[in-house]
Amino acid sequence: MRRRVTAALLVSAVVIAVAFRWDARDSGRTSLKAGSPAETRTGVAGEHDGPIEAALRYVRSSGQLLSSGPIGRTELLRHLVTARLVASQASAVEADVSSIQSRLADGGRAGLSVSQLRWAEFPLTASVGEPIGGRAVVRVWSVALFGAPQLEVTRAAWRTFTMTLRAEGATWLVDDVEVKAGPTPTDDGTLATSSFDEVDQVVSWPPVEPGRGGRT
């Protein structure tokens, strides 16, 4: 189980690291503003939240987990995963942070720290199985937007999370997770790139609650 959890978190490191190999030819694309309100919105589970709400909180937490310090990261994980996973996930994220920082230095970006990176992940669709014996499997398809002002670029990574959640009292927590890249859509090459301010404005909007708008 631990190997799968660690591998899931490393997906964040891989896609970010790839982003920093993009050169000045990408500088015409949009970027997320430093200090943008696009912080992931996570917190203590609601009293009546079910497995799907808990899964969505976990997906939205990816950027906050990468940017938090060790104490804040561990505290956040206590609200997202079962007790047996807190230490292993905290260690995996810390390894991601170190790996990303090394890749930045290798790419000539030694002056850029991981805390300056912008990462916002948005769940798009979700599927949940019928809970059995206090456990449920939830699959979430998401898009992560990431970049940094210094890089003058914003990129998207499409990912699918498969999570097993466990009920602990009235709270659902992630007890196992696997992340795979894709499915990844593409455009036909005719779409115009939006301006910096247009992207920053919509990224700062609150996330849509499950069942409100779109397909359910």
Image: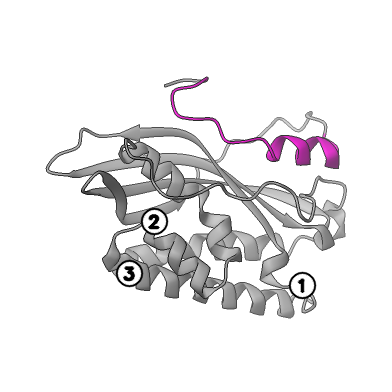
Q: Which numbered disc, 2 or 1, marks the residue closer to the eye?
A: 2
Image height check: is 193 above or below 163? above
> Which quadrant holds the N terminus?
bottom left
Name the residue nearer the viewer: 42 or 56. Answer: 42
For numbered disc 1, what is the local secondary structure? Answer: loop
In magenta segment, residue 209: yes
Q: Earlier in the sequence, mark 2 or mark 3?
A: 3
User: Residue 166, percent across and down?
Assistant: 23, 49
Within 10 Å of disc 2 (Cα), the crowding (few <14, some 14-19, many 20+) is many
Q: Which residue is mark 3?
A: 3
Q: Secondary structure at mark 3?
A: helix
Label number found at residue 122: none
The answer to whether residue 178 of the structure is visible from this angle is yes
- The residues colored magenta run 193-213
Measure the C-alpha gap from mark 1 to mark 3.
Answer: 30 Å
Q: Is 109 on the left-hand or right-hand side of 48?
A: right
Could you tell me if residue 8 is visible in this image? Answer: no
Q: Does 109 appear above or below 7?
A: below
Residue 79: mark in rendering: 2
| Residue at image coords 68%, 32% | 187
- Tell me which numbered mark, 1 or 3, is placed earlier along the sequence: 3
Instruction: Name the kind of residue labelled 3 in the image.
Output: Arg
* Residue of label 1: 112
Q: Amino acid at mark 1?
A: Leu
Q: Is residue 5 left or right of residue 94?
A: left
The colour style of the image is one colour
